[in-house]
Image (cartoon, grey):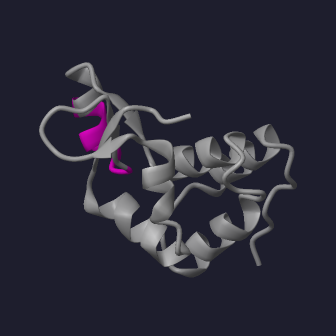
């Protein structure tokens, strides 16, 4: 199921590239372009708050990956989350573990 148009900033694009999952953008969204969007693909918390104040629906890298799993495009999130952590992409471990639990996966352990 495609979700309309998306605008992406560099953070989520870089994270998806690190994971080798850029194709998820085409699978989940009907168009990827800039001026007018149904969704803004953004991880930055401050920018996200501003966008939401303008009425834009926002989704970040983790939300996109969870959506891809719900739509049958991914079988597991945990290995991808581990790759992001190992690649020095910062995400709250509490958030990642909550997403994993919500998707019937075991939480990550940090060594």
Image point 78% across, 42% down: which residue? 103
Pinpoint residue 21: horizontal percent, then vertical percent.
52, 67
Left or right of residue 49, residue 26 in this image: right
Residue 28: say if magenta. no
| Quarter of the rendering containing residue 81 | bottom right
Quarter of the N terminus within the rendering: top right
Q: Which quarter of the rendered picture does the C terminus lie within?
A: bottom right
Q: Residue at x 67, y 50 (%)?
A: 94
The reply, left or right, for residue 60 in relation to residue 110 is: left
Work out whether residue 110 or residue 61 is closer to the camera in this orientation and state it.
61
Residue 74 or 64: which is nearer the viewer? Answer: 74
How many numbered badges does the structure rendering display? 0
Question: In the image, residue 3 lies at what x, y percent?
Answer: 45, 32
Give me the residue at 78% from left, 63% from top: 108
Span of residues in magenta: 43-50
**Is residue 39 positioned above or below 21 on the image?**
above
Q: Nearer the viewer, residue 2 or 6?
A: 2
Which residue: 44% across, 47% down? 60
Q: Position of residue 46 (x, y in %)?
A: 28, 41
Where is 31 relative to 12, above or below?
above
Residue 76: image location, x then y, percent: 77, 59
Identify which residue, 73 or 98, lies in the foreground.
Answer: 73
- Left or right: residue 65 versus residue 32 is right
The prevailing secondary structure element of the residues shown in magenta is helix
Q: Is residue 94 above or below residue 70?
A: below
């Amino acid at each position: 199921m495609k979700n309309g148009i998306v605008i992406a900033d560099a953070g989520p694009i870089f994270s998806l590239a690190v994971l080798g999952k850029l194709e998820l953008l085409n699978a989940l969204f009907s168009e990827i372009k800039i001026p007018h969007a149904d969704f803004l693909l953004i991880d930055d918390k401050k920018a996200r708050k501003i966008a939401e104040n303008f009425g834009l629906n926002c989704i970040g890298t983790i939300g996109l990956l969870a959506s891809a799993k719900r739509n049958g495009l991914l079988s597991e999130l945990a290995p991808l989350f581990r790759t992001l952590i190992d690649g020095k992409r910062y995400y709250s471990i509490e958030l990642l573990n909550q997403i994993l639990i919500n998707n019937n996966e075991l939480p990550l352990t940090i060594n």
